Amino acid sequence: MRDAAPGLVHAGLSQKGRELVFSVRASEPVALAKLEPHPDPRRASARYLCFELSSDPSAPPQRYCLGGARAHRRIGLELVNPAGKPGRKLWVRANVKRPQPQKLVVAIIPRDAALSPDRYRWRAIRSSGCAVRSRCAEAFPALGTAGFRLRPVRAVGCTGGSAGLVTNGPRDRKLVALTFDDGPSEYTDDFLRALREKGAVGTFFEIGQEMPGREDVMRQILAEGDEIGDHTMNHVEFPGYDQIAGAAARIRAYTHFEPCLFRPPGGGVNASVVSTAGSLGMRTVTWDVDPRDWSLPGTEAIYSNIVSHAQSGSIILMHDGGGPRSETLVALPRLIDTLRARGFGFATVSELLGYRIVYRPYG
């Protein structure tokens, strides 16, 4: 005898900023722990709650299912073959919330889930298991599928860009911000790749004179969930209005992104610099961990300096431009691993300070 199955009352699919949001309401609370994140719906006994999406009606869908270990932080992804059999089984990072006892809301980043902007057909399916040769699975819509268009999005700005000076974030959360100065450069692609492979994010403070010809990598920084900040037009210490405004204008022109962070070259800061940046909608950001990688002390020295000084809320200074940066690049994956093993998470500077990146659909 199996538990009574909560019926599907409603399901929805929407886009909020850069997130794709699944929502489902059942007639009774859904027990996530009892669900299979990689089920085979052809089995009558399977227990699942999934969303199926396909951009090609003639092709098998991709199936995204709740349940399993860490059910509130990830969902299962199944690639289904033409016979309906689950093929490759993967995991996708997700934020799963239960705003009401009978309602679940799942937010994912489409690129993490192998979804690109396109028109999709979708449906929700669920079953709490039933006897062999019985039929107890159901779907929403009950017949056919619903349509949805996933639009491309881009980062257009960030909150929190008011006058002020910060050297670190809150000390009560185990988060740090990795920051990179003096780019974009020929090394920036490799730094992005290292962050992507380790599932970390960074903030890139960029110099206006280095931007022409590197527009693509700037857009890629933002597309991958990282952040861009202003680092003046010509790396001038104690800069005036034109130096700060000029770099911000190029960032906007090349990426459609309005920066809300400014980093003074060399950390040189006074009341005038903070006020000028604030008048342009940017908070002035320095750091509390400096491995002096610009002096090329060696990969081991860079790594050791960072991991020995990082603490909750740290803003860590590194460089992806302004000279040879292979020492920093080699140190980066290992220091991410070490800090993560010590319980630290990674955030952009805006996120570390409690703000957020603003995304807007286009096209």
Image (cartoon, helix red, strand yellow):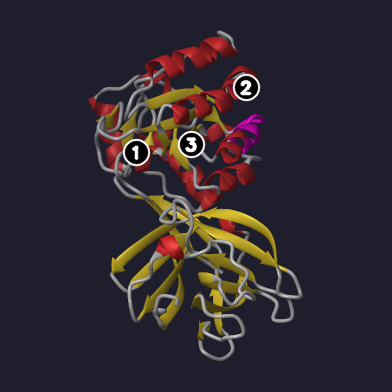
Percent x, y of residue 98: 32, 65
Percent x, y of residue 82: 76, 74
Magenta stretch holds residue 214: no
User: As shown in the figure, which amino acid type bears the numbered disc 1?
Assistant: Leu
153, above or below 129, in the image: above
Identify the residue at the far bottom of this view: 143
Q: Quadrant of the C terminus?
A: bottom right
Check disc 3: other Cα within 10 Å, few if <14, some if 14-19, many if 20+. many
Q: In which quarter of the image is residue 1?
A: bottom left
Q: Report the mark closest to the observer, 2 or 3.
A: 2
For this rendering, which residue is in front, 321 or 248? 321
Q: Which of marks 1 and 2 is nearer the N terminus?
A: 2
Residue 64 visible to the viewer: yes
For disc 2, the marked residue is: 330
Q: From which residue to which does the magenta span run?
A: 185-193
Percent x, y of residue 187: 64, 29
Residue at position x 41%, y 82% in the image: 7
Check disc 2: other Cα within 10 Å, few if <14, some if 14-19, many if 20+. some
Check disc 1: other Cα within 10 Å, few if <14, some if 14-19, many if 20+. many
Residue at position x 34%, y 23% in the image: 311
Say left or right for 332 vs 186: left
User: As shown in the figure, which amino acid type bears the numbered disc 2?
Assistant: Val
